Image (cartoon, rainbow, N blue to C red):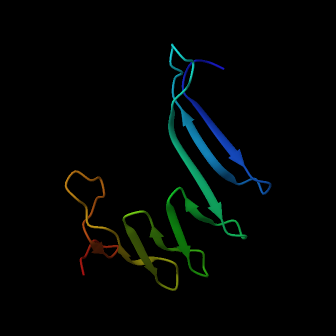
């Protein structure tokens, strides 16, 4: 292998990725590559993802994501009968965050 960054992945028996790591350039003195990022993945028996790292996903019967829970924030989503998002709620952005819109809005950007 070369001396650049390396991406490693682990897969389960159902051919689903269960872990992914990004390793940096090895240090010249030790030869050790620093771990830059690591994620794990968890799935329901039907194959839908239920967790990526510390983020947990709730799905409805139609397999739409209805909630995302993380260490210090949460998101919620609601759908109409055809599967369109009708409501979305996520944390209010703090100064310097890349969170985008503040508070809750519908798909037209209207606040409630």
How many numbered marks appear?
0
Q: Residue at x 52, y 86 (%)?
A: 81
Quadrant in which the C terminus is drawn: bottom left
- Give how far across and how far down residue 87 sits, in percent: 37, 79
- Give how far across and how far down residue 47 sits, in percent: 70, 65
Q: Residue at x 57, y 18 (%)?
A: 31
Quadrant in which the N terminus is drawn: top right
State whether residue 25 is above or below residue 17.
above
Q: Quadrant of residue 30?
A: top right
Q: Is 16 on the left-hand or right-hand side of 69? A: right
Q: Is 6 on the left-hand or right-hand side of 74? A: right
State whether residue 9 is above or below residue 64.
above
State whether residue 3 is above or below residue 43.
above
- Give how far across and how far down residue 39 sits, in percent: 55, 49
Q: Quadrant of residue 102?
A: bottom left
- Give the farthest residue toward the right: 13
């Amino acid at each position: 292998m070369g001396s650049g960054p390396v991406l490693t992945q682990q897969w389960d028996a159902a051919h689903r990725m269960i872990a992914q790591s990004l390793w940096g350039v090895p240090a010249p003195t030790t030869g050790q590559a620093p771990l830059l990022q690591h994620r794990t993945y968890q799935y329901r028996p039907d194959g839908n993802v239920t967790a990526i790292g510390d983020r947990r996903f709730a799905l409805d019967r139609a397999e739409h994501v209805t909630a995302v829970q993380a260490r210090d924030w949460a998101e919620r989503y609601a759908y109409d009968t055809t599967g369109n998002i009708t409501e979305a709620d996520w944390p209010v952005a703090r100064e310097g965050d890349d969170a985008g819109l503040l508070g809750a809005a519908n798909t037209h950007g209207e606040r409630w």
